[in-house]
Image: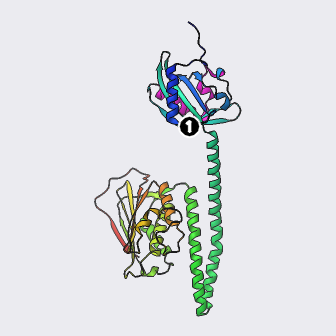
Amino acid sequence: MKSVDPLTYMPEVLVGEMDTLRKEFLTSFERGKTVFLIVDEAGIISYVSRYIEDILHFKPQDLIGTSIFKITDSESLLKLRHFITGNSGRLDHVTYFTDLSFICSYCLRHFFDGSFVAKSSDQGIRLLFYLHDVTERKEEKEKLEKINMELDNFIYKASHDLRAPLLSLTGLITLSEMTGSTENKEYTKLMRHTVKRLDQFITQLAHYTRNNNLSINHSVIDFHELFSNVVESYRFLDQTEKIKFVIEIETTEKVYSDAFRLKVIISNLVSNAIKYHNAEQPNPFVKLSVQSNGKRVLIGVSDNGIGIDPENIEAIFQMFKRGTDKSDGSGLGLYIVSKVLKILDGSIKVKSTLGLGSSFKIDIPNKLLAPARHYSSEKNSLKHFA
């Protein structure tokens, strides 16, 4: 029988299959960044395209008859073994993968996205690999992530440094109000309002960066304490004394979540409810509620404030977007809420009627540290009027 050079011969059906894979995985690819490989069920290479020399700097003829695992990076070894052993029997099934790394004889390693499929041939099962080099893209992504992390850390640290002089300035304003004339008190009132606005903005920046960088820490949530502390922290806002705060807790289950992030969510929603309350409403209120069935937690923040124009509803969770132009807020609050909920695997829904008020419903999972108990039909309802 005439011997055949595996570098120059490949069954037509395999060539056609690889062409199909190429078209399915990428609509276009850069010449010189793509490698085709054929291995058997043991991982022995029977074909490799010539572009492997341009990318990994191995000569194709040196790889024929050797194991693909010899050129596989240690971090991808188990992943590739699982691909081959787990899919060799699944004929004609295309499997896609990302970040599969191979050793380079010039540099440390290269990363590949691609796909493979198991085919039956006269020689037995063969796996066809299509590899697209994404090393440059991955390196650029890692650089960008590092830059973003450094920027977040800078903002977080700077926000703390900026708050110190603001607190000092607030103290000086207080002294001036105590000793100044009536006219001066009007000026200091405006100064205090401006300082508070700046302080809130800096605090929001700190919350945003801390949410991005802080690891999740689950603990038992005391919602009565959480709600009460948030309400108390906003007593300084103008006209807050006119607003009735209602707290309703309806659950018999222990709720586990990230206390810091929950406080950020509730604080921003309560702050908005206060800022956008209806001054013409004789009995303004802000209601905070929570319910849990053991697996899910539903948190509500509602009010009878000025409401949100339907045209602005879709945009309120975007950065620097506000539901109304009747406030001087930063437009960061609800954007931060949406980002925090993404980390908590939660969601938020809003219903609002212009002139009648708004209702925000938050749905988050109960991250139980102990086995979940069955939900009791007997609710422990606690109502508190702040």
Q: Is 319 situated above or below 64?
A: below
Asked whether residue 190 is in view, the answer is: yes
Asked whether residue 82 is in view, the answer is: no
Dividing the picture into quadrants, the one containing residue 364 is: bottom left
Asked whether 18 falls inside the magenta stretch, the response is no
At mark 1, the secondary structure is loop
- Point out the image quarter for the N terminus: top right
Asked whether 63 falls inside the magenta stretch, the response is yes
- Point out the image quarter for the C terminus: bottom left
Q: Position of residue 350 (x, y in %)?
A: 40, 64
Q: Position of residue 372 (x, y in %)?
A: 37, 51
The span shown in magenta is: 62-88
The residue under label 1 is 28
Viewer-side residue, 168 vs 132: 132
Q: Is 118 situated above or below 207?
A: above
Q: Position of residue 268 (x, y in %)?
A: 49, 67
The residue lying at 69 percent from left, 30 percent from top is 105
Question: Please, what is the three-letter code of the amino acid marked with disc 1?
Answer: Ser
- The residue most toward the bottom is 181
Q: Position of residue 208 (x, y in %)?
A: 56, 61
